[in-house]
Image: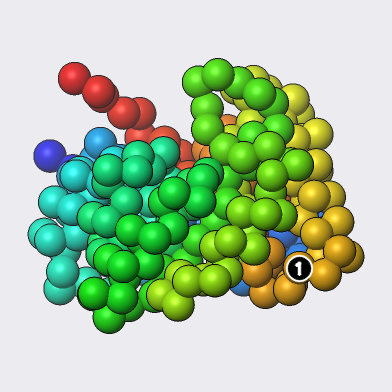
Amino acid sequence: MIDSVALTARLDDVRDRIAAAAGRAGRTPASVRLIAVSKTFSAEHVRVAAAAGQLDFGENKVQEAHQKISALGDLPLRWHLIGHLQSNKARKAGGLFDVIHSIDGAALLEPLDKAARDAGRQVDLLIQVDLAGERTKHGVTPDSLRALVEAASHWSALRVVGLMLLPPAGDPDDARPYFARLRALRDDLVRQGVPPAALAELSMGMSHDFEVAIAEGATMVRVGTAIFGERSYL
């Protein structure tokens, strides 16, 4: 049984916190897009959030997302892949998602582009950057970032729009230097001549640290637990 009143109240609280964090940073709330991370939650949870005005939803796995996207085809939702994309799932992802936050290699680009073209659609891409060198996480190194941004810009059905980061787990202030460094990397690339439109978005910040991420320039925050509640992976 879904407690739609509680879910809507949590969603409203997250929106209020985003607005307050943006205000403290001298920004407008509209400069931050909330991605409600619905992984492991049902299509009906998504439907409740959508009824409260939430349109952007994030999923980690292609197959789970496919089921929800099919079940919710009557709603004008925008679907984001925020989990790691394996090359053998790239073609399917290109036909499903509006935004993919986890591009970490040029091998993903051709199958994504073909799938998007076959579906008659455009897919926005964010390049995932690895700033901590954690073995359990993915992403390109700062030294490889510009080459991948440029490679991704050559495909007709793909559009590079920004960068994504998963900092090491820890307290919100522990993540702040990583958020600040991603923003600095973006600014350096713009100064080097990369078109600003290709780097407009910074996807960083989750339920426990999105306010710090907003202070450091996040334009997309990926919030799940604070909206849908604690997850059960059973």
Residue in the image at 66% along x and 24% along y: 133
Q: Quadrant of residue 3?
A: top left
Evaluate whether residue 6 shows in this view.
no
Q: Residues within 10 Å of mark 1 (few under 14, many from 20)?
A: some
Residue in the image at 45% along x and 77% along y: 156
Image label count:
1
Q: Position of residue 157 (x, y in %)?
A: 41, 75
Q: Which residue is more in the foreground, 31 or 126?
A: 126
Q: Is residue 197 left or right of residue 75?
A: right
Q: Is residue 150 above or below residue 205?
A: below
Q: Position of residue 71 (x, y in %)?
A: 11, 59
The amino acid sitting under disc 1 is Val
Q: Residue furthest bottom?
A: 120
Q: Quadrant of residue 70?
A: bottom left
Q: Which residue is more in the foreground, 13 or 45?
A: 45
Residue in the image at 27% along x and 80% along y: 120
The colour scheme is rainbow
For the C terminus, give its image quadrant. Answer: top left
Q: Is residue 218 above or below residue 117?
A: above
Question: In this figure, which residue is indicated by the disc labeled 1?
Answer: 194
Evaluate whether residue 157 shows in this view.
yes
Residue in the image at 55% along x and 62% along y: 152
For label 1, the SS is loop
Q: Position of residue 99 (x, y in %)?
A: 43, 62
Q: Which residue is more in the foreground, 123 or 204?
A: 123
Q: Is residue 10 left or right of residue 192?
A: left
For the N terminus, give its image quadrant. Answer: top left
